[in-house]
Image: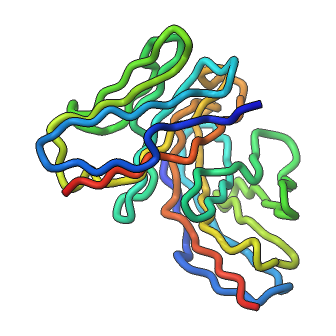
Amino acid sequence: AQSVTQLDSQVPVFEEAPVELRCNYSSSVSVYLFWYVQYPNQGLQLLLKYLSGSTLVKGINGFEAEFNKSQTSFHLRKPSVHISDTAEYFCAVSDNGANNLFFGTGTRLTVIP
Amino acid sequence: KAGVTQTPRYLIKTRGQQVTLSCSPISGHRSVSWYQQTPGQGLQFLFEYFSETQRNKGNFPGRFSGRQFSNSRSEMNVSTLELGDSALYLCASSWTSGGSYNEQFFGPGTRLTVL
């Protein structure tokens, strides 16, 4: 069965500092990997996705993630965060692109001025 | 292009009642998936409908049901509400039902409170 582990439930970081949000997954089949962001009282917005090909994926708002098959990881990074990046971030996996996504428990990123 | 809309945005019910939530997908999208989000269990997949047929189902009791209409709008129904059903219910729409990846777009959610 698929599962997604987000190792940090909360990550505080100072404005303009770099950040990495960690995500590990387990699956026995070919997977697609995603990072979503959720702002208060809103739905989920797709930040980036890995389907195949290059293991370094660039997304919106300056975020990027690296797929590491041997370590079954898909960590999200941003070199310099802004106050507006304060939100909850979810890592998700899908088997072969199926629409039923399996989500991690989320990481709350708080950017400190 | 209008996004995914969900109605109502907020709902308060009491235990034992039933509730119906509605989701209107992006125009042209034929797949609608529903998710439950709670502080304890996180985001969990409920079910997916494509062309009026249920394609996938998560691990939820039979009190949770859904349907999709010919215009792709979807409703989910929860009968005999329990306190634990209090959650944010999100729907997501996409062009097709999986396969080569097609992005899912999420609505703002319906926050259900069961008293």
Q: Is residue A1 visible?
A: no
Q: Nearer the viewer, residue A67 or A100?
A: A100
Q: Is residue B99 visible?
A: yes
The part of the image, by quadrant, that contains residue B46 is top left
Residue B12 position within the rendered picture, expressed as x and y whole percent measured from the top left: 28, 51
Rendered-image quadrant of the N terminus of chain A? top left
Left or right: B87, with B78 as reference point: right
Residue at 48% in and 52% down:
A3
Rendered-image quadrant of the C terminus of chain A? bottom right
Residue at 60% in and 30% down:
B93
Q: Nearer the viewer, residue A98 or A11?
A: A11
How many discs appear? 0
Above or below, A75 relative to B5 = below
Residue A60 position within the rendered picture, expressed as x and y whole percent measured from the top left: 84, 55
Residue B85 position within the rendered picture, expressed as x and y whole percent measured from the top left: 26, 50
Q: Nearer the viewer, residue A107 or B38?
A: B38
Left or right: B57, with A83 as reference point: left
Q: Nearer the viewer, residue A26 or A12?
A: A12
Residue at 50% in and 31% down:
B23
- The residue sitting at the top extreme is B70
Residue at 82% in and 71% down:
A78
The part of the image, by quadrant, that contains residue A25 is bottom right
Above or below, B112 relative to A62 = above
Left or right: B5, with A83 as reference point: left
Residue B111 position within the rendered picture, expressed as x and y whole percent measured from the top left: 40, 52
Colouring: rainbow
